[in-house]
Amino acid sequence: MDFARPNGYVEQLIFIISPAILSESETLMSHLADALLEAQLQFFMRDFASPTLRHHLECEAEAYCDLLETLSARELLNEAQVIAWIERNILNYSPTDTMREQAVMLVELGLNNPSHQQQPMRQLINKQIYDLMVQRLVERPALRQELIHSALSSPLYTRVLSDVVYHSIVDYLTTDNVIARRVPGFSALVKAGKGMLGRMGRLDETLEQAIKAYLGRNIAATAAFSESLVDKALNNNAIVQFAELVWPRLEAYQLGQATRHLEIQGLSYLAVLYWNQIRQTDYMNQQIELLVQAWFAHAGDMPTMHLLRLLGIEREHIVREVVEIGEPLVNAWRDSGYIERRLEEHLARFFDDPATQRLLNTQETLPT
């Protein structure tokens, strides 16, 4: 040691004992950090314990509702974010076989429930709703006429009508029916016609060609005439009267009878195939984008809480559901030790952070 150098002894002494001082300081700081971590951990855990948990959840829900009073829907999520979420989680989702089987199992259990089999239809549709449905139909004659026209002007209907008229004419001309017997000489005429056509050969083919040629020229007019008859028959009074006659049978109709022909396995498979096809189309993407943008144009700038009120969701509803769902969920997290482990990990990261260590070191050196 250089004892001759001024203050050399002191410097050497400090050099010798400084590691011990630093080590003690670090130990004290470590103890302080551990104590603070434990104090904060216990503080938060008290918030998550009954009976303070319910109060804590209520306070947090109220605070969030206060925030929703000031933020618009667009400030929370914009159009692009909502569209992207729908694309990621709905349009890009392909139902798995397991998901489909689970859905089928639940539906079949519901349909096979003995109480479902014997449940009358009036449990689903009461007379008031039924009358409103009939009234809506009565108030829309243009829609009714369009439906009748679409059905009766279709190629399927004209083919059926042509076949019905054809067989009716053939049956009338070739059968010695009651009407023919009442007309003097008509029966003999039919028999003579049969004999003549029989000598010509191919009776059925000759009749068919002649009658179908006639129907081909006149079936459009016949279909239009039947359309006018149906439209006239389905007037407002007739619909109301028919609905009144149907209701007593409908209300007593058992749900088991209505669903006995449902084949859930096949329907579910068809539904998945259809969804996987349509979700990948440009049409679906365009519809999603159009609808989301239209909704934001209409309501995106409203305060979110005001918008929720317009939808029938009040502040007390939100607070109630946060408490009712949050309390058992947080209790399960707390009892399993999950919350304490997560809090301890985050607090340890905070106290191990160099900035926190510097603050604690500064606190240690402040004068008392």
Image (spheres, grey):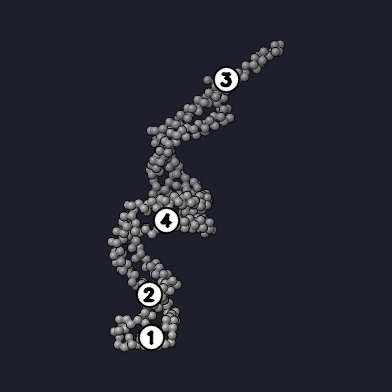
> Which of the marked residues, 3 or 2, is nearer the chain's N terminus?
3
Residue 339 appears left or right of 110:
right
Residue assigned mark 1: 194
Task: Say what amino acid the circle numbered 2 marks.
Answer: Ser
Q: Residues within 10 Å of mark 1 (few under 14, many from 20)?
A: some
Outermost residue to the top? 4
Residue assigned mark 4: 264
Give the percent coordinates (x, y) of residue 73.
47, 48
Task: Say what amino acid the circle numbered 4 marks.
Answer: Ile
Q: Determine whether label 1 and label 2 are within 8 Å by CB.
A: no
Which disc is residue 336 wearing? none
Q: Residue at x 54, y 32 (%)?
A: 349
Residue assigned mark 3: 24
Query: Which quadrant of the figure has residue 68?
Result: top left
Task: Say what amino acid the circle numbered 1 marks.
Answer: Lys
Q: Residue at x 50, y 50 (%)?
A: 89
